[in-house]
Amino acid sequence: PMLQEALGIRPHVLVLNKMDLADPRQQPKVLEQLKQQGCPHVVFADCQRDSNVKKIVPLVARLISSSPRYDRAENAEYNIMVIGVPNVGKSSLINSLRRLHLRKGKATAVGGEPGVTKAVLTRIQVCETPLMYLVDTPGVLPPKLGDVETGMKLALCGAIRDHLVGEDIMADYLLYTLNRQQQFGYVQHYGLPEASDDIGHVLKHVALILGKTQKVKVLTGTGNVNVTMLNYSAAAYEFLRAFRAGRLGRVTLD
C-alpha cells in the first residue's frame, strides 16, 4: 500500500513469481481481485524455468511508450527498479531476464532465504532491444503486519527468517493450512497412513523416515548416559523446506 502511493502514475508491472508452487486453480480469482484493487498489469512467472518471463520486457516497453511523461527521449533507455517482499525471487527474475534476452549468466546472488540482497545494486543490463537496465533491491516488508496469520503466511513463504517465528510453530500452522485446504500431498510424500491434525505425530514420522536424530545427555543416579532421540526441530525444518520446494503439492496460502 505504501508503494502504491510512492509509484503514483509511474508505469509498473506486478510479477507474481514462483507460479510453479502456487495452486493454478486460484489464478483467475487472484487476477480478478488484483484488477479490482487497481492493478491491471499482472504477470505470473517461474524464474526457475523462465516461464512467462518473456512477457515482461515487451509489457514494460509498451507501458513506458504509452506514457507521455516517460516517452520523451529519442534514444530509449529504460531503467527499472525491482521491488518486493523478501525471498520472492527478485534477483532470480533479473538473472532469468538476462538468460533469455542476453544469453548471459548470473548477475546477482540468489538464495532460498530472506536477506541475500543486502543493498541496492548498480543497474544490470537485462535486454539489448529495447535497451533495458534493472536495479535489484533488498526485500521490504511493512514495519507492522496487519495480523498474526498474515505474518505466518509470509514466514511459511520464507519472507521472514524462520528462527524469528520458530520452525515448530510454523510447521504446526502449515499442517493446519494443508488440512484446511484438503491438500494431503504430505501424506503421500512421507508415507503416513492417513492425514493428521497432530503436528507431533507428523514430525515424529518425518524424523523417523529421514533419520533425523540427536544425541542427548541424560543425568541418572549412576552417571551420565547418552541417549539417541528424534530431532523434532530438524524434522520441522525439513517439513517447511519440502513445502517451499513444492514437494507437498501446489498450494496458495491466501
Image: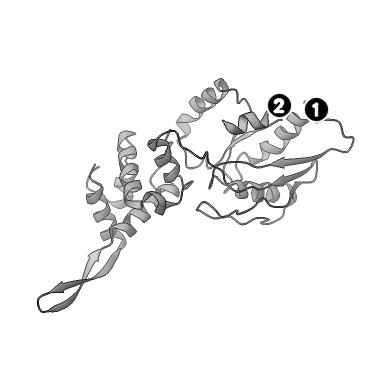
How many residues crowd around disc 2 within 10 Å: few (fewer than 14), some, or many (20 or more)? Answer: few
Residue at image mark 2: 9
Quarter of the figure that contains the C terminus: top left
Residue 200: give x, y in percent of width and height: 23, 50
The image quadrant of residue 250 is top left
Q: Is residue 159 left or right of residue 93?
A: left
- Find the distance from the CA under tag 2 to the CA under tag 1: 9 Å
Q: Hey, what amino acid is under mark 1?
A: Arg
Q: Residue furthest bottom?
A: 222
Residue at x-position 65% and y-position 42%: 82
Quarter of the figure that contains the N terminus: top right
Residue at x-position 23% and y-position 65%: 229
- Secondary structure beneath dot 1 equals loop
Residue at image mark 1: 69
Q: Is residue 45 left or right of residue 205?
A: right
- Secondary structure beneath dot 2 equals loop
Q: Depth check: give the residue in front, 10 or 49.
A: 10
First along the sequence among labels 2 and 1: 2
Residue at x-position 53% and y-position 42%: 18
How many residues crowd around disc 1 within 10 Å: few (fewer than 14), some, or many (20 or more)? Answer: few
Residue at x-position 14% and y-position 79%: 223
The vertical placement of 101 against 9, above or below, is below
